[in-house]
Amino acid sequence: MLEHLNRRQFLQSAGLSALALAGAKPLLAGSSELLKKSGLRIAYSAITWGGKDDQAIRDIASLGYKGIQLRANTFGPYRNKPSELKALLDQYKLTLAMFSSGNVEIDPAKEQSTIDQHVAHASFVKALGGSSIQLTNSARPKGRMPTTDELKRLSQVMNEIGKQTADMGIQAA
């Protein structure tokens, strides 16, 4: 009996199957001359695992990837114990390629808490041995394009986050 799969489950299964069939493990492990010469490093995002980041770390490492992108949902359970997450990444020989830090709010009432949240994420990333955070935005209102003023506001808040995280040695992207 075929069970119902959501889009993420389908993409995960299809992607993992394609990689396995293509013999991607040696490629991802760095045996490809092209990858060696280019210096290109390939990572995979844990988003496909729907919050089951411990499982994502094991699965991604088993496929030969050397890096992983984790998301802001990882911050909650490991906020006060980043060394445990770092040990897990080290155990599976994965580096933190990127940390998706989440939305940047442009509501002036939420500005400081937004900046503080992303700076805390950057500190967390630094403890994990990472070097960058990914900022996303919520400036696109439903049913219309953002205004010039909204985009300017977004850039101001993102620039402030970038300035503070750069001071820590973490790049905001």
Image: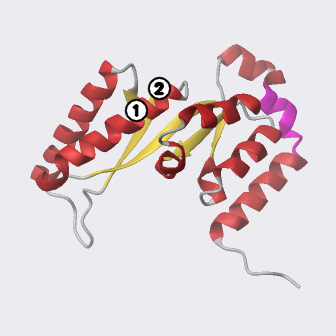
Q: Residue at x 87, y 47 (%)?
A: 20
Q: Is residue 32 visible?
A: yes
Q: Which residue is mark 2?
A: 126
Image quadrant holding the N terminus, namely bottom right
Please determine whether, in this image, residue 11 is positioned above or below residue 166.
Answer: below
Q: How many marks?
A: 2
Label 1: how many Cα within 10 Å (few below 14, some 14–19, many 20+): many
Q: Nearer the viewer, residue 128 or 135?
A: 128
Q: Which residue is mark 1?
A: 122
Q: Is residue 136 magenta?
A: no
Q: Say whether residue 65 is left or right of residue 111.
A: right
Range drawn in magenta: 22-29
Please determine whether, in this image, residue 1 is positioned above or below residue 88.
Answer: below
- Percent coordinates x, y for residue 110 in the rendering: 19, 53
Q: Say whether residue 162 is left or right of residue 39.
A: left
Q: Residue at x 40, y 38 (%)?
A: 121
Mark 2 touching mark 1, by CB under 8 A?
yes
